[in-house]
Amino acid sequence: MPVYNAEKTIERAILSVINQTYNNIELILINDGSTDGTENIMKSYLEKGSKIDIKYYFQKNSGPSIAKNLGIDMAIGEYILFVDSDDTISENYIESLVINQKEGTLIGASYKIIEGTEKNNNGIIITNKTYDIRNEILNDLVIGNLNGFIWLYLFNKEKMKNIYFEKDIRYMEDTLFLIKYIINNNINNIIYLKDIYYNYYQTDGSITNNTNKIIKNILSFTNSIRKIENIIPKEEKELKEICKKNRANRISKLIENNVSKIKERKILKEYQKSEEIKQIIKELIEDCNIKSGYKLYLKFTMNSPYILFLSYVKIREILKKMK
């Protein structure tokens, strides 16, 4: 469990693991340089003692990927499950995942979206599809039809050799990890348990109104998409082509989501002057796989004065709502 400044949520996360019906558990808490009261809460559970084995490690703030990699190396159990520090798991979550393990099969669970602190009864996400063809699994992960959240799956520690989270990416690090695990272990099946929930607490993200953050988001996402494309085996030509076709439109959508949040003239100008962004936009516009609507949007955002830009974004939002 990677933890950073989670003093308001870490206790419920820890208790949900302690209260599991399955008792042969080691809980590894990786404190990623927290500066609030998180450390005191975690250490209090070390002092109290528990029916499960709790381990604690502090590292300077290095990000969740490095924290999870450390946890992988520290783990001594047969299986590894990831739980975020602001989420919880149902009491039979681990037991159900363990008893349903099958060779060559990845067992996943359903999850419940909880907004803020109030449960959203309509937020139960159940994957009814069972996968029995590896390329179908990879295809749906690549195009975004299959959730790559790693906390939905139980991983075999022995099969995780040399599979780690990449520290230099911020987007889709879970999906990248999952694809590597599936390819390296020739996983051909995914089975989802219908009534076992991971409780995913969703908080509203703040509006991105900072040029550096917008540019960083776009560059990081582009890097992630390309990394996923590169790890697909060369012999999987059809899947590689799907990756290539999907890449441009996914990057375009992310650009639209970020750029539409720009609310200041200065930020738009800085965005339009970025040489890195110009190069990405140029490649996207020249890509035959990208939808014409996105090409028009990309051209407009790079060349329009501020007032026209705001008007265009507003009209586009209205048209989307009308569909």
Image: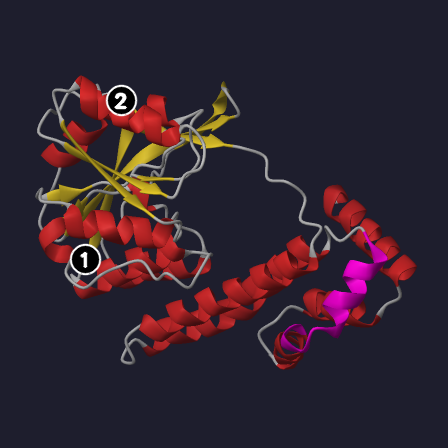
As for residue 308 lying within the magenta part, the answer is no
Q: Main secondary structure of the magenta part?
A: helix
Q: Is residue 208 left or right of residue 240?
A: right
Q: How far across and down, in percent of the image, does residue 38 sit?
A: 38, 30
The disc labelled 2 sits on which kind of residue?
A: Ser
Q: Is residue 198 visible?
A: no
Marker disc for residue 187? 1
Secondary structure category for the residue under label 2: helix
First reached walking from the N terminus: tag 2 or tag 1:
2
Segment colored magenta: 264-277
Secondary structure category for the residue under label 1: loop
To which quarter of the image does residue 85 belong? top left
The quarter of the picture where the C terminus appears is: top right
To which quarter of the image does residue 42 belong? top left
Please name the residue shown 29% across and 63% down the image.
135
Asked if residue 183 is positioned above or below residue 14 in the image, the reply reads below
Residue hosting label 2: 44
Asked if residue 145 is positioned above or below residue 322 in the image, the reply reads below
Asked if residue 103 is positioned above or below residue 10 in the image, the reply reads below
The quarter of the picture where the N terminus appears is: top left
As for residue 271 lying within the magenta part, the answer is yes
Q: Is residue 307 left or right of residue 156?
A: right
